[in-house]
Image (cartoon, grey):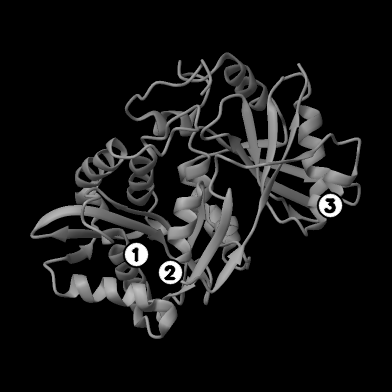
Amino acid sequence: MNDDSLSNENDVAFILFNKVGNDNLASEKERRLVKRLNTLENVADVKISDLNTLKAAFSAAASDDPYYISPTYYALTGRRGLYLYKNEDQDKKPTTFLFCIHPNIQNTILAFPPFGHNPAQAINSLVEELRGTGIRFQLGRVSSNSDLCKTLINDNDTGFRQKIEDTLDWTYPLHTVNCQDLTEHKGKNYSRIRQVMNKFRRSSALTRDIDFSKDHSLIDSLSQNWEDNTNHYENYDIKFTEYFQHLVSMANNEPALNLRGLIVSIDGVNKGFSIWEPPQQRHGAANLFASQVTDFEITNLATYLTVKSAERMLEEGTERMCLGGSENIGMDTYKRGFVPEKTLEMQTLELDIPE
């Protein structure tokens, strides 16, 4: 961890999401960077109130990476500051992309693959506008086979290089499962899932729908218990203790996202929660943003909760659930246990912008 690690203050995510740079948890470089971003003509600050616009924009899009077209994902990853960059080529054809202050590492911008006609030109255009900041610039969730990746790596003038990702959720591949197959759990591939569900059917385990307006304190308490029992942040400069609070805040402040979730209990005691975003498109995949349990001594409770979440999604007409990628091999092994229908590998490109 860096010497300038951030302390764990309440409501950090909400404060930094709305205006990075006016809080003493931001580094000096980040404060200077945000001031510069605010002066750029082609950069727009994205707030919670803009998420419905993102949802509408993504509603007709399709992607093998459901997070790429998820307004909730961008808001969560960009909780320290989320921005939209707008670029036009000489023919006035637009290209846009979202970028953010890195959620876990200081002095780093994280951009996502652009939408539009000239993605490489748009990325390089922002990089040029940031010359002199001395920050790291990363482009994440990039397919190795994409034209964008090949262009940036092969162009020696850009300075981009492949980075071994070890912090973010595409360190290991993204997995999407079939909700029908998972909930029916037939066949030898689902034997472990079948055993787990049979075990909990004979127990006192129950699930109920989350009411975000009433359950925010409960989710806060459960998430704090989970965080107290995990070393999830050991590789990060910045802890995201407020991740779940921010997720609940979005559910309450932007109901158009239609965030859904379950509370799981054992013997009447609440033990965990799941939260997901329904798909923006027909036949799309729901994005599972949380499936956390606080009692690690109850074996496979998290598995039970994830399968019950898939059952609820299926009831609402959702055919697939994206489990996301993983930051470590243990979590990747766990997600592979749900028998993914589709697996997608992604990578990060990086360059250092000089002072």
- How far apart marks 2 and 3 lie (CA) works out to 33 Å
Between disc 2 and disc 3, the foreground one is 2
Give x and y (percent) for residue 187: 41, 85
Mark 2 element type: loop
Q: Earlier along the polypeptide chain: callout 3 or callout 1?
A: 3
Residue identified by numbered label 2: 338
Instruction: Tell whether label 3 touches label 2 (CB within 8 Å).
Output: no
Residue identified by numbered label 3: 150
Residue type pointed to by label 3:
Lys
Q: Earlier along the polypeptide chain: callout 2 or callout 1?
A: 1
Residue type pointed to by label 1:
Thr
* Residue extending furthest toward the left: 267
Picture layout, residue 156 above or below residue 188: above
Closest to the observer, 146 or 303: 303
Residue type pointed to by label 2:
Phe
> Quick one: quadrant of the C terminus?
top right
Residue at screen point 57% across, 70% down: 342
Give x and y (percent) for residue 304: 28, 66
Give x and y (percent) for residue 120: 82, 47
- How far apart marks 2 and 1 lie (CA) works out to 9 Å
Picture layout, residue 86 above or below residue 305: above
- Left/right of residue 31 with respect to residue 130 in the rendered view: left
Residue identified by numbered label 1: 306
Closest to the observer, 43 or 226: 226
- How far apart marks 3 and 1 lie (CA) works out to 37 Å
